[in-house]
């Protein structure tokens, strides 16, 4: 079984995508004892780190006591082979995901609309010191 959960290069995957990946991984791994998950990406390993870290949080919340050794092995692999999550956006998304799982962060299901922006002063958009025309 091959699943593609692609996302744009140089971006952290959306929270919905992280949830989908973790659910698919968990479903597959719990379907049979011999099932394994192989993660592959074309970018840097930090993006894989986001997925592995998210799944570690996910499996910690939903796991049984029998999976403690698996989590330990995954943590060792993560520390040894996968580049730790280093980008601020990646760390932030792992924090958001962990908060969603623990219930400390609630999602707002109603859209928020930005109606206007008030800027005090005119920004300097030119490198020579000029100002943008009104």
Image: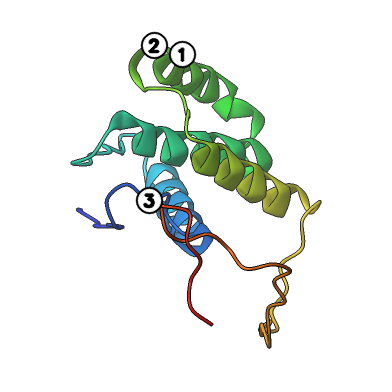
Q: What is the residue that sits farthest to the right in this orientation?
A: 104
User: Left or right of 84: which side holds 37?
Assistant: left
User: Nearest the camera: 16 or 125?
Assistant: 125
Quadrant location of residue 42?
top left
SS category of the residue bearing label 1: helix
Residue 47 placed where, x, y %? 36, 39
**Residue at 53% from the left image edge and 25% from the top image edge:** 71
Q: Which of marks 2 and 1 is in front?
A: 2
SS for callout 3: loop
* Mark 2 and mark 1: Cα distance apart in space: 6 Å
> Would you place residue 29 above or below residue 13 in this image?
above
How many other residues sit within 10 Å of disc 1, few (<14), some (14-19) or many (≥20)?
few
Neighbour class for label 3 at 10 Å: few (<14), some, many (≥20)? few
From what the image shows, is residue 126 above or below residue 73? below
User: For residue 116, which quarter of the picture?
Assistant: bottom right
Which residue is drawn at the image coordinates 31% and 57% (left, top)? 7
Q: What is the x, y in percent for residue 76?
A: 46, 13
Left or right, residue 1 beside residue 80: left
Give the residue number, with chain letter if any, for mark 3: 11
103 or 132, nearer to the observer: 132
**Residue 88 x, y percent position in the rendering:** 54, 37
Which residue is the site of mark 2? 80
- Give the percent coordinates (x, y) of residue 44: 27, 33
Query: CB atoms at circles 2 and 1 under 8 Å apart?
Result: yes
Circle nearer the N terminus (3, 1): 3
**Where is mark 1, residue-wise?**
76
Q: In this view, does 90 lie above or below 1?
A: above
Q: Alpha-carbon distance for marks 3 and 2?
A: 23 Å
Q: Which of marks 3 and 2 is in front?
A: 3
Q: Residue at x 30, y 34 (%)?
A: 34
């Amino acid at each position: 079984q091959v699943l593609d959960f692609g996302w744009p290069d140089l971006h952290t995957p959306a929270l919905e995508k992280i949830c989908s990946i973790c659910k698919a991984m968990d479903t597959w791994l719990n379907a049979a004892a011999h099932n394994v998950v192989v993660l592959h990406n074309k970018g840097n390993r930090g993006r894989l780190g986001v997925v592995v870290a998210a799944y570690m949080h996910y499996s910690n919340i939903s796991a049984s006591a029998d999976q403690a050794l698996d989590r330990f092995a995954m943590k060792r692999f993560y520390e040894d082979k996968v580049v730790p999550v280093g980008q601020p956006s990646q760390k932030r998304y792992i924090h958001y995901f962990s908060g969603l799982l623990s219930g400390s962060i609630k999602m707002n299901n109603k859209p928020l609309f930005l109606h206007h922006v008030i800027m005090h002063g005119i920004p300097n958009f030119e490198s020579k010191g000029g100002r943008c025309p009104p």
